Image (spheres, grey):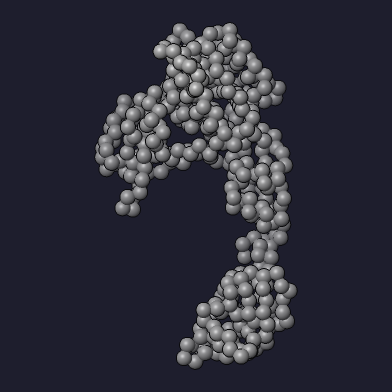
Amino acid sequence: MISFAEARTIALAHVAPLGTEEVALAQLLGRYLAEPIVASFDVPLFDNSAMDGYGVKVADVAEATEERPARLTLQGVVRAGDAVTPELAAGGAVKLLTGAMTPPGVEAVVMSEFTEEREGAVLVTSPVKPGENIRRKGEEYRKGDIALPAGTRATPPVIGLLATFGYASARVYTKPRVAVLVTGSELVAPGEPREEFQIYDSNSAALDSALAALGITDRAVVRVRDEAAPLRATLAEALGSADVVLAAGGVSVGEYDLVKDVCAELGVETRFWQVKMKPAKPVYFGTHARGEREQLVFGLPGNPVAVLVAFHEFVKPALLKMMGAAEVGPLLVLAVVCAKLKKKRGRREFVRGLAWAEEGRLCVKATAGQGSHMLGGMAAANCLIHLPPEAEMVAEGERVEIEFISWEW
């Protein structure tokens, strides 16, 4: 049995991004850039007004006050998209709307609130500093700058920045194909008739939605009985097409926990099995050679909470790295415990928690229902409390590391 840190390192060491493809901006959300984005021109493209106001020479308004406003001659109006007016003369002002190109000679822009137009003149009641309220050409990016590194996730502002540079598409990493096998002879599909000895299958729906939240569209979910022949056939079919195979259930030490043995029969090499963690101790990871690439096979425990914790801590980082993410976490922050927590020494424990801000600090408490079969406690949680192997008790008021639960990234 290995530590959680060792297991995570092993899993990620076998992950590499897939190929790349060019994708239009409209379909780019959530994808990861396969190439750095280079500024194709200066941003801003030209000096422009940061707000509605009047372009002036600094010396002309240096002594301006409300009692003794500076009187300037209005030389014209420039809106965003207008051609620039002639050079500003001393004693003059030009009306500029937000985003308008500043004419030559304009040294600063006075906000409209400090001005008044009257009979072809502009009265200015406040001095300005050189460059005030002017966005300078290239102050954000110079042509040739790396605006976005490879591995950046395409969020709305990232897509907006691409559009700013005139990109209609970008090269991103392709998404993996994922097959999900949910084992259990006792399982019935939600909505179907159920016998007393059967239970509804929650793992299929939970894992399918977890994959969908990551933007994975090529996914297949199959339910299979705890029998070697159908499991072998289903797993062989999955290995014939998928980049990643997830098996939920059948990875512990019971008589019908067949996943690990069937994987070995099909040529899957075990990389680890059983991790010093709770929940999800019997988690399994293996790789299967297919051409020059390795297929990833994750065996997740069957209990609903263990399935989702193992997915969040092992499968999701692997999928994100495969999709080209530069960072895959986990991002841990400190929070103050509002009620004591206890655990066994020697294993990392993931307590489902609810975190909130209070009086300038981040607080956290465990949710009700911490059993690995109690999905309600996971549904109510917004974070996982990481209790390290050496810990046995965390007193109220002490700080712990928490990881906010995110299914999207």
Q: Residue 394: x, y in percent?
A: 28, 35
Would you identify the image quadrant in which residue 160 lies?
bottom right
Would you identify the image quadrant in which residue 123 lies?
bottom right
Examine the rendered structure and indicate whether residue 205 appears above or below residue 47: above
Residue at the image point whose x is 51% and y is 85% from the top:
125
Residue at the image point whose x is 26% and y is 40% from the top:
396
Front residue of 75 and 351: 75
Q: Residue 35: x, y in percent?
A: 68, 45
> Which quarter shows the N terminus?
top left
Residue at the image point whose x is 34% and y is 34% from the top:
367
Q: Residue 337: x, y in percent?
A: 30, 40
Q: Seen in the image, is 393 located left or right of residue 188?
A: left
Q: Seen in the image, is 364 located left or right of residue 168?
A: left
Front residue of 147 and 10: 147
Examine the rendered structure and indicate whether residue 19 appears above or below residue 285: below
Number of marks in the rendered image: 0
Q: Seen in the image, is 183 located left or right of residue 389?
A: right
Q: Residue 209: x, y in percent?
A: 53, 31
Q: Is residue 291 visible?
A: yes
Residue at the image point whose x is 64% and y is 30% from the top:
218
Q: Is residue 320 visible?
A: no
Would you identify the image quadrant in which residue 371 lies?
top left
Front residue of 326 and 67: 67
Front residue of 117 and 210: 117
Q: Seen in the image, is 339 located left or right of residue 15?
A: left
